[in-house]
Amino acid sequence: MKFIHPVKRGYLALETWFNLSFGNAWNPLYNLGTLTFFFFWVVFVSGLYLFIFFDTSLTGAYASVEYMTHDQWYVAGVMRSLHRYASDAAIITILLHMFREFALDRYRGFRWFSWVTGVPTLWFVITLGITGYWLVWDDLALYIAVQSSQLMDALPLMPASMSRNFLQSQINDRFFTLMGFLHLLGQPVILFFALWIHVKRLSDVSIVPPRGLAVGSFIALLVLSLLLPAVSHEAADITKAPAVLNVDWFYLNIYPLMDYWTEGQVWMLTLGITGFLMIMPWLPRKKTGQAAEVHLDECNGCEQCAMDCPFDAITVQKRTDGARWENEVVVNESLCAACGICVGACHSSNPFRHSQQELVTGIDMPQSSINSLRTNVESAINNLQGENKIIVFGCDNAINFTGLQSSSIAVVSFFCVGMIPPTMIEYALKKGADGVFVTGCRTGDCYFRHGNKWFDERLAGERQPILRKRANRARINIFRAAESDCKELRRELDRFQASLQQLDADHESVNEGGS
Amino acid sequence: MKKFIRYPLQIFNYALFMGLVGYFSLYPSYHHLDENQAMITFTLGHVGKHVRACVKYSQEDLLKLPPNMRKPMDCPRERSPIIMELKLDDKVIFSKTAPPLGLYKDQGIDIYENIRAPAGKHKLTVWLNDDVKVEGPIYQLEQEITLAPEQHLVIEFKSEIGGFNVF
Ligand code: HEM
């Protein structure tokens, strides 16, 4: 069995647990980005409501928050709690999102851009939370205001000391208003743009989680808000130094550290972590395969590949070769992840074409052309012996399925399941396979984002190119498996082989009955 | 997996998630001070005196200077370091010699230092020297103070009032 890194094994175990609890479609681990967006929506809407009652002046802020928390606890109080807890929940989902991308090695190579742009986004989220706590203007707010100022003073940025602002008679009303402006407008706008850039290189990005997950998460937040309403500390008072502070560890974790370390050390730690995260995609770097190539002679500009590309690497432009079609496609090599999904999307990838010559398709992968795949499929089937010959199609990024190979089972690997043209399945059946078994990344978790989804839609006849109705579905089995699912995969393959046997037996008895 | 099993599992997962959210949004509480402790902040924003007094240029020196640089007095840019010490019941709780900032050592410094101290009655002594030409304390304050637990006492040096402001 292939060695699986313990981090990855741990992650996969967690994923299995969530698949059991939620099913693949609602698995929170497959929806961490969208779930974070959902929490941001909750924060945004509850924030709008809080803004109605919030007094942005230094003298009025605390009282206005107290009014919301106690006098109007049934709406504004609940909104305040939702605002806080959704922000906290977002930190958990962001950390899990990072952990997942790391554990599954989805942060290097062509993914460097998403990873690197994620890091400043995390800064924007955390600093947004800090200014939020600042606005309450209670003991905790004063504490973080002074501590933050000391951190700022340690940087050679401003000539005047910020910390000294907070001493009696010098507390600056205007400074507080600036914080209000930052939290209510400036930082959210920056965060919005940062997120936009973060997902810019991806296509078909969903920012809405599956409804069941959204409803469940919202109810959970609401229950927490009712059971443990968010409250303030006492009003900020410079003559007091509260001994005990209930710090929100999701956002305010560096402040207590300042009691043990100097400001310079705290900066070194935070900037060090940031810098390390930023260079992680190159430690060591991961090579992306050769980009897809367009063969204009076989391309009619149908745009299906551009629609299916998960990384927005294919664009459509006016025809340049004088052919009668209106458009052609172009591959942006720097964005191409070499997943081959475009090959599976191309009508010209049909292996029944040009059976006596080289098969050239409209868009192809130089390292593993559709012609060579057709040859592999054919020769693999020719080498099979016995009854119930099965050909297994799988991808390079999920379970290592080459070990399944036997005298009656052949394996052919594709870059991604989405690279398999549906006609290749028909072709395998036609060439003598009794069954086609397709494996690959777990449902909802395609390494190349959409390969599984497009494949399923093609087979269901919902996406071009479709698997024709006449292809015998009973001879096609799809079973998705992660690296740790060896036993499950074996079991399913045996089951499939038995079902093929049954199919043949039924077929024979029908034939005998008929004769 | 059967759907009816899934729902209890989901409820369990949500409860765990919200448990984490609720707990770490407040706990473990951070003990910023021990019981019966107060916080003293010593702070100043000040520029030290010039390292030496201005002297009149002699005729000879003036001639050596380029014509556009000639002025009657030779004044140094460099400022003195600021030396400060804070004692509670004759025990030094903070002391620092802060050199002037800037490439030409001509800029002031800012201090904001938090010091924890036991609550109760104390003799507070604080002094400061901002002039290299003078030995020992230039500004000094000695005062009886009573610190309540969780009190925040600020000792601010203000050149405008020529001394320390305790509040
Ligand atoms: C701050 C809040 C964040 C939100 C709301 C967010 C959201 C998203 C979303 C919606 C996607 C697209 C997922 C897909 O459709 O396949 C994504 C992808 C990604 N994110 Fe984030 N993200 C955040 C922070 C981060 C951070 C801090 C990192 C890492 C430092 C990160 C790393 C990545 C990576 C590597 C991908 C690429 C996934 C792929 O190509 O399949 N994200 N993020």
Image (tube, coloured by chain):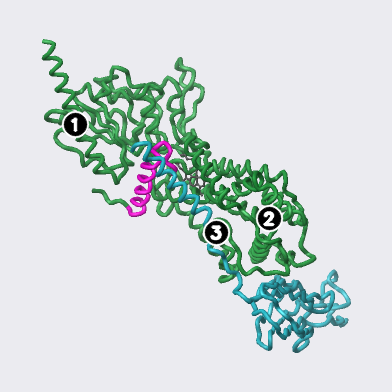
Chain colours: A green, B cyan
| Disc on the earlier residue, 1 or 3 | 3
Tell me the element at label 3. loop
Q: Circles 1 and 3: CB distance less than 8 Å?
A: no
Residue at mark 2: chain: A
Q: Which residue is mark 3?
A: A249
Residue at mark 1: chain: A
Q: Quadrant of the C terminus of chain A?
A: top left
Q: Which residue is mark 2?
A: A136
Q: Which residue is mark 1?
A: A497
Mark 2: few, some, or many residues within 10 Å (few <14, many ≥20)?
many
* Residue A126 point in image, percent of width and height: 58, 53
Q: Main secondary structure of the magenta part?
A: helix
| Disc on the earlier residue, 1 or 2 | 2
Q: Which residues are magenta?
A: A5-28
Tell me the element at label 2. loop
The residue at 72%/86% (across/down) is: B123
Which mark identifies residue B78? Answer: none
Q: Is residue A494 left or right of residue B58?
A: left
State which quadrant residue A354 falls in: top left
Q: Circles 2 and 3: CB distance less than 8 Å?
A: no
User: From the viewer's perspective, is residue A305 above or below residue A48?
Assistant: above
Amino acid residing under circle 3:
Trp
Distance from Cα at disc 1 to Cα at disc 2? 66 Å
